[in-house]
Each structure stands twice: as structure tokens, then as C-alpha cells.
Amino acid sequence: MSAVQQMIPVKALPDDDAEEYREGKKRYPWWVKKMDNITTETDDSKLSKPGLNLLVDMYFTHKDKLDGLLEQSKNSVIKANENKTPGRSLRDLALHYAANTYMYQTIGSMGDPYFNIQPGIQEMQSSWKLHPPQELGLERWQGSKQEAYNTLEKAAIQLGAGMMGVTTIKPHWANVGVKLGADVEEQTQDGMKTLIPKRMKYVVSVLGVNPADLTRRNKTELGAAGDRAGYEAAFMATTRIIRFIKGLGYEAIDAQALVPVIPYAIESGLGELGRMNRMINPIFGGNIRIGSVITDFPLAIDKPIDFGLQEFCVGCKKCARECPVQALSHAEEPYWEPVNQWQVAGKKAYFENNQHCFDYQTAMNNYCSTCMSVCPWSKQDTTVLHDVARIAGSKAPFLSKYIVYLDDLFGYGLIEDKEAMEEWWSEETPVRGVDSRQGRKL
Ligand code: SF4
Ligand code: SF4
């Protein structure tokens, strides 16, 4: 036992012999009955090897046949494509493999130590599934740019994105050391420079949506969990989308470290730049994180949008008011001059003091998303009042002060009260905490 462990007094565990049945919220509607036993007949005296051993056994029993089975499986995929079997086309296949991204990673990583399966088996089993269709002798997916956009958007939402937008590369919008539109065939590392080929001219931005019920409990570990959930959603969707595009036969790379993601997302119509100097989306507000992919998959592109945010921000100032370190600007209008050397000039914005924001978050050891949570546009609420307020706010900027007043009045701020904080653990929440259809009346 370590010295630290010895210092911690060990509390006796509660008596674990007496089982208890769960009380509280009903899990099912009335027509589902609770039973004393499961509805499948069982007999423990006849029980053979249970659980995970089954998988190991299956693998070893079929070891000799495995290559043949994999070849059969590959041929069945190729044939289904050639025969244009409904539901088994190339894009269906690409979706299947993209949806399988983390399943393979998980099994692959636990396979060796836990199952004692030979290293490399998992890659062997899945390798051809990761290859572009050209390696299976199949033509890559072809369609018009509009069809390509619709296909990718449908897949992106299914794969975890809250929304998707597309624009083209702007060669001057790249991170330091990155050259977009370079005269190279493939992404190339040239000393400290990353060169992105000319043909990879589409930038796909996707939204990861934060679970608002968590981010409203901001400046706590619960709030941090919500903040990270948005990033996780964006990054996981990004990885899956890359696999999907590759599965269609095109090239795709994660652009997170290559380009500034907010400008590209704004350019592709996913939102406007708000006072908080982050993108605000008309459906999810500021409660979002952004993932980004660069690809040569020919896509239709989006136009930027205007939902009245610029006018709304003038009177609102709620993010600036609530920022715990007053890092956000209270100015009456945006300006051209950045606050410090860590900001990029060239846009008229409410530049914030990002040093204050950074210091505060680092010292807290969790993440602040106060500004994103309190923004009136972040409330995924479909009540008439809210719809009216939003429409009025976007068309008549002077009303935004009044709307902020209503927003506060209806308890749309942060949750800080001790009891309400704890309530999260007993509240009903949608899967992953996000109801992606809320606030969305197209
Ligand atoms: S994240 Fe927090 S500290 Fe940073 S600007 Fe927003 S409210 Fe202020
Ligand atoms: S909180 Fe208000 S001022 Fe800040 S970004 Fe949102 S709408 Fe704009």
C-alpha cells in the first residue's frame, strides 16, 4: 500500500449482502411488467462456457477457415456493389465502415492482452475494410455535387455531427506552417511546412453539440463534462466522416491543426461571429464545438448566413456581463484591433482578452463555457415565447435588451444553486444529453 493510500481513512463499505430493487422513476410505459425472473428459461446445471470465452473459442475453432471466410466476405461486398444490390451500394458500405470506427479501435486494443489473440489479427480482419474502394477493384462513388453534398450531410448527421457545412479553401486562411493549394500530389511534410495539394479544396465543417443541461452547470466538473462532450462529439464525427469519404474513394484529412476552424465554419453558413468571439449557430447557439475536414470529394458549397446576430449582440452583452473574469468586450460596436499578439487581425470583431480566459480556465482545472451557455441563442427551447423573442430580436436589435431580461426572468441562466446542481443526476436526458431536433423548425 502506498504512503498516500495509508493516509486515507478506509470507511467500511455498506452491507452488500442485502440486494435492493431500484425505486424511483419508471423506465418503461405501463404495458411493460416487472418480473421476478427473465422470460428465457435457464438451467445453471447445463451451463457451458459463458461470456467472452465464446469469442476466443470461435476464433480458434475457425482459425484455419478464417482466411477463406474473410475472402468470402470481401467477395460478397464486391458482388453486392457490382449487382447494385439495394442497401449494399458503395455509399451504404462506406457508412457501415464509418459507423464501425470505434468498435474496431476498441476490439483491436483489447484484443491482444485480453483475448491473447495474436498481434495484428485485428488489423488483418479489418484491413481491407479500411481501404478505398479502388483497392477492391471498385469504381469510386460518383454523383453530382448536390448529390455528393446530400450524401455527406446525411452520413455526417448519422455519424454524430449536429450539423454540417461546406466551403472551399482560402489559401490565405491557414495555420502557421501550412500551405494550402500546394503543387503536390499528396499531403506532404517539407521541413516545418505541411503542404496540402490543390485538388483538396473543400473544407467540411461539422458541429459537436454540448449537452446544455451540463454546460449550464458551469464552472464545475459537471460543466466541464458538458464542454468536453461537445468536443468529443465533433472529433468523433470528424474521424468517422473521414472514413466515410475514404470509403467513397476520395481523400480526406483532419483539418483541425491545419486551418482556423471558426472562419471556415462561418463561411460555410454554420453561424455568425458573436460578441463572445466564437461562432453562434441559429439552432444550437454558442453551445457548440467545431470539427473540420479537408477533402477532394467534389461537393456543392454553402453560403454564409445572417440571422440578425450582429444587431442582437449590440444590445445583449449577456456573455460579457456573465464572464467570470470579464474577458469579453462590452464595447458598443466591433473593432479592427486585436487585444494581443495571440489574436489574428483582419476582421472587425469584439476581440476578447483571451489571456484572462486562458489563465482562468487553467487555474480552475476545468473548463469554462459560461459565455456559450448564457447566450440567449443557446437555449434549445421551442416555446412560443422563445420563438417570438428570437425572431423579434433578430429583426429589431433594440429589443435584444428586453429579450435578455426575459431570458434571465425565465431562469435561462446558469445553474449554481447546490440542489439544482445535483438534480442533473436524477433528470431525464436525451441520449448523450442533446436533443438535436429541439429549436429546429425548418
Ligand atoms: S470561456 Fe469563460 S472565461 Fe472565457 S470568455 Fe467565456 S465566460 Fe469568459
Ligand atoms: S450572449 Fe448576447 S452578446 Fe454574447 S454572443 Fe450571445 S447574443 Fe451576442
Image (spheres, rainbow, N blue to C red):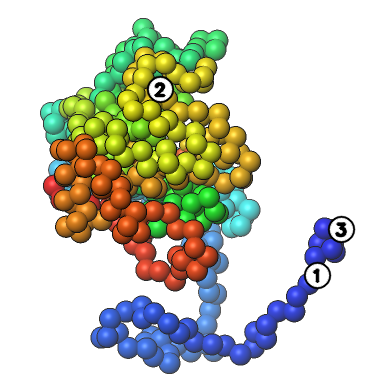
Q: Residue at x 40, y 22 (%)?
A: 259
Q: Which callout, 2 or 1, points to the residue nearer the camera? A: 1
* Side of 113 relative to 264 (left or right): right
**Label 2: which secondary element:** loop
**Label 3: which secondary element:** helix
In the image: residue 99, left or right of residue 140? right
Q: Quadrant of the N terminus?
A: bottom right
Residue 259, numbered label? 2
Hey, what amino acid is under mark 2? Answer: Val
Q: Is mark 2 within 8 Å of ligand 1?
A: no
Residue 148, horizontal then vertical, whole percent? 18, 33
Q: Secondary structure at mark 1?
A: loop
Residue 9's mark? 1
- Which of disc 3 and disc 1 is earlier in sequence? 3
- Report the mark closest to the observer, 1 or 3: 1
Mark 3 or mark 2, which is nearer the start of the sequence? Answer: 3
Residue 244 against residue 73 in the figure, above or below: above
Q: How many marks?
A: 3
The alpha-carbon separation of the residues under discs 1 and 3 comes to 12 Å
CA separation in Å, label 2 and label 1:
51 Å
User: Mark 3 CB in 8 Å range of ligand 1?
Assistant: no
Whether residues under marks 1 and 3 lie with C-beta atoms below 8 angstroms apart, the answer is: no
Q: Which residue is mark 3?
A: 3
